[in-house]
Image (cartoon, grey):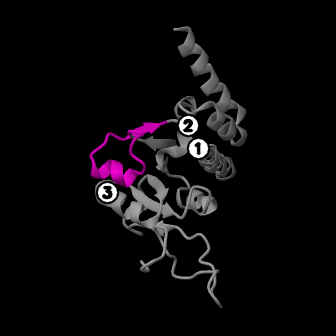
Amino acid sequence: MKYIEGRSGNYVWLSSAKERMGCGPGSPLHHARPGDCLDKPVLVTEGALKAATTQRFLTDRYIVGNSGVATAHGEIVKTARRKPLEIAFDNDSYTNPQVARALAALVRLRRSDEVRYNYNEKVRIVTWDRSIKGIDEALLTRALLQYLTVSEWLKQLSPECFDQAGEQLSLQDRKEAAGRLRYESIQ
């Protein structure tokens, strides 16, 4: 990636399918410190810069950044195989149905991988003050990070986001979240 004067957007990939004779970069994962934390929990966030910033603060994690919430899920799952997975995408999964759906699709793929390779490690959704967009900003402002289970995360989604995420997840996840919602409304 590099900055190009006058171009819009946060990142310009080293290659571009839009350029004459250009090629697409694919959807590579950025490994913030490869080889350094291979036995640690894997935290995934959006983008190389967020991954690098996060690694400076959370040195006890293996940090990877993907190029968007719906990309490189297979690579993420493979990188996190037999390790706890922490998903720290931007905080818009609560209000953006497409983001909630993509996050849930990653969780579903991880659960399938657990069955296929016979392991059971925690999956947590990392969240923070919702007025802060990304984990990099949250860490830089010393916001409190919360590590939610999938059912705790589902419980906090808007109804439209819950529906989109629920389409991707197991019946068990939906029942747990719905049960908690009903139980809390009775209290």
Which residue is at a point 45% across and 77% down the rendered structure image? 6
**Residue farthest to the top, as pictured:** 187
Distance between the Cα atoms at labels 3 and 1? 30 Å
Q: Which residue is mark 3?
A: 59
Q: Which residue is mark 2?
A: 150
Residue 90 appears in the figure: yes
The numbered mark, 2 or 3, whose residue comes first in the sequence reads 3
Above or below, comparing residue 63 to residue 144 in the picture: below
The numbered mark, 3 or 1, whose residue comes first in the sequence reads 3
Amino acid on which disc 3 is placed: Thr
Distance between the Cα atoms at labels 2 and 1? 17 Å
> Crowding at label 2, few (<14), some or many (≥20) Cα neighbours within 10 Å?
some
Q: Nearer the viewer, residue 118 or 69?
A: 69
Does 20 lie within the magenta span?
A: no
Q: Which residue is mark 1?
A: 96
- When asked about the image quadrant of residue 37, the answer is bottom left
Residue stretch in magenta: 129-148
